[in-house]
Amino acid sequence: MAVEVIHFIMTGGTIDSYYEASKDTVVPHKSSIIPSFIGGLKLYTKSAFTEVCMKDSRNLTPKDLKNVLKVIEKSPHKKIIVAHGTYTMPDTARYLKANLKKNDKTIILTGSMFPITGFSPSDAPFNLGFAIAKMQDLEPDVYVCMNGKVFTSDKVTKIISEGRFASLLG
């Protein structure tokens, strides 16, 4: 039996950032720390990693989104988690859904409101773990997994004032 692989695609965002006191905000690391974090979990699945960029999601360009799409389409793996900034996560989920040539992969976008390291508590480990766990149950499609809930790409929005996601249907 073939060993299952989850392909992690990193784009930056708060989940993969550190606090920069001189700017009074978080800044994405130069390279992702998610591979080392996932490696420490001793998962039963194998992991593959591709770093597309390391940016705040508000700074993602159309070229960045095309590169994420290209990595997904070229990936031999059927299970993909995209670590992404939360500001534009719903937009990227809809972009991927609209532009994927085939809908044969389960794609989950996740991120966090606090970096994975340097803040305690952080929602990042939970959100990554939740996405990994839900990967077993979800049919091929594009989803957002945040705050312990799964949202379909066409019905998700971020409520900035609450620091969480919700369904457009209420």
Image: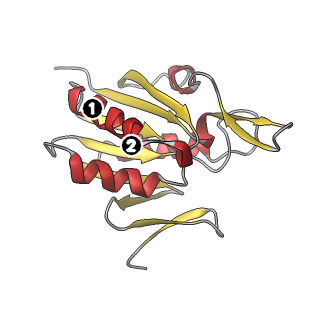
Under circle 1, the secondary element is helix
- The quarter in which the C terminus is drawn is bottom left
Neighbours of disc 2 within 10 Å: few (<14), some (14-19), many (20+): few
- The amino acid on which the numbered mark 1 sits, given as a three-letter code, is Lys
Look at the picture and state if 113 lies above or below 132. below
**Percent position (x, y) of residue 109?**
41, 46
- The quarter in which the N terminus is drawn is top left
Q: Is residue 163 left or right of residue 151?
A: right
Query: Mark 2 against mark 1, which lies toward the viewer?
Result: 2
Q: In this view, does 70 lie to the left or right of 11?
A: left
Under circle 2, the secondary element is helix
Q: Which residue is drawn at 38% across and 61% down?
A: 151
Residue 111 tag number:
none
| Cβ atoms under marks 2 and 1 closer than 8 Å | no
**Percent position (x, y) of residue 115?**
67, 39
Q: Which residue is drawn at 63% across and 62% down?
A: 163
Which residue is nearer to you in this view: 56 or 47? 56
- The amino acid on which the numbered mark 2 sits, given as a three-letter code, is Pro
Look at the picture and state if 19 lies above or below 77. below
Which residue is nearer to you in this view: 53 or 164? 53
Q: In this view, does 88 lie to the left or right of 28?
A: left
> From this viewpoint, is residue 138 visible?
no
- Dot 2 corresponds to which residue? 62
Which residue is nearer to you in this view: 101 or 61? 61
**Percent position (x, y) of residue 145?**
44, 52
Q: Earlier in the sequence, mark 2 or mark 1?
A: 2
- Dot 1 corresponds to which residue? 70
Neighbours of disc 1 within 10 Å: few (<14), some (14-19), many (20+): few
> From this viewpoint, is residue 54 visible?
yes
Q: Which residue is drawn at 63% across and 48% down?
A: 123
Quarter assignment of residue 94: bottom left
